[in-house]
Image: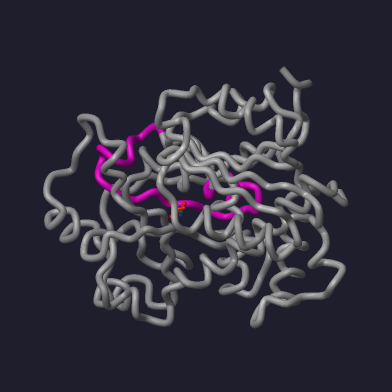
Amino acid sequence: MGEANRQRLIRVRDLSDAALADLFIRARRYRDEFAGDGGGPREWRERLAGRLIVNLFYENSTRTRVSFEVAAKRLGADVVNISAAGTSVAKGESLIDTVRTIEAMRPDVIVLRHGNAGAPELIAPHTQAAVLNAGDGARGHPTQGFLDVLTMQAALKHDRLDGVTVAIVGDVVHSRVARSTMAVLARLGATVRLVGPRCFVPEPFAAPGVEVVHDLEAGVRGVDIVIMLRMQLERHSGVRFGSENEYHSRFGMNLRRLDAWAPKAFVMHPGPVNRGVELANDVMNDPRCLIQQQVENGIFIRMAALDMLVNGCNA
Ligand code: CP
């Protein structure tokens, strides 16, 4: 077993306020310099030269896995992608034995996605590499929270979010994205409304700065940002809403509702989207929909996170 590893980004709270500010500063700098052709200044393209980033994904992913790969490559790192299917994991190798095998190849960062909450803490004592949580069960997905907030800041044109109200609509109880994005929003002073049926948004989610609302119109009326969540069918065990059509008619967002209840609001979604369930096509085609910007900002946030873990924080 290697020594306990101190470089980790597993929960939003692993970053101090100063480190969080540093992360956003770096991500904006990368966005300014790498947007467009993705080139960027030479010294930044070599920030992670000679470093090995291992993306270890036990759950399906498009956005997160690809953007970690793009982020690492833009900074000059070597990248290895491992998914459970197609490796010795499929022959029964345990998570820890897999990490011990990877450890022998001297990685600098292990980016882990796993279906079980706490998996990143489980592997951390078994590697000298930094551990970065790319989603663990329904508990956390910190880089998604950071990229969501970076996207809001750009759309709203201010960095502090005091006075900003964000509605998070849908399957909150099963959503690691909701938990991480709420944690970042709380740090920046935003007010949150959690909106959905009682089975997805139980009362105990209410907290200082967090209101629970069970009616879509009341929940989104007048807000600045609406984040629509996917129904996490793979995590439902006995908690169901009924049919997808019924869900869409009560909690789905369409252009008519957006125009009537929150016409100035921007609409976000972490993806993947169930079209016609949480979001209608007309909203996805509207300029207020920021889904593409979220994906693009994911690259800059992940560049910043990898850079901070490998090269240290300026805070
Ligand atoms: N938002 C998100 O985590 O998407 P993926 O599951 O495609 O990575």
The one nearer the camera, 262 or 19, is 19
Q: Is 108 drawn above or below residue 74 in the view shown?
A: above
| Residue drawn at 47 percent across, 31 percent down | 88
The quadrant in which residue 9 appears is top right
Image location (x, y in percent) of residue 53 = 68, 47
Q: 302 or 247: nearer the eye?
A: 302
> Viewer-proximal residue, 3 or 136?
3
Q: Is residue 95 magenta?
A: no
Q: Is residue 66 above or below residue 238?
A: below
Left or right? Give the position of 120 relative to 109: left
Q: Residue at x 68, y 57 (%)?
A: 72
Residue at image coords 48%, 67% = 224
Magenta residue check for 196: yes
Quarter placement of the N terminus: top right
Colouring chosen for the image of the structure:
one colour
In the image: residue 255, left or right of residue 42? left
How many badges with numbers are in the image?
0
Q: Nearer the viewer, residue 38 or 168?
A: 38
Q: Is residue 209 visible?
A: yes
Residue 227 in the image: state x and y as whole percent.
42, 59
Picture quadrant of residue 288 = bottom left
Q: Is residue 206 visible?
A: no
Q: Position of residue 144 (x, y in %)?
A: 54, 53
Residue at 48% x, 29% y is 117
| Image position, residue 76 (x, y; %) | 76, 61
The magenta segment is 181-204
- Answer with left or right where residue 32 lies relative to residue 141: right
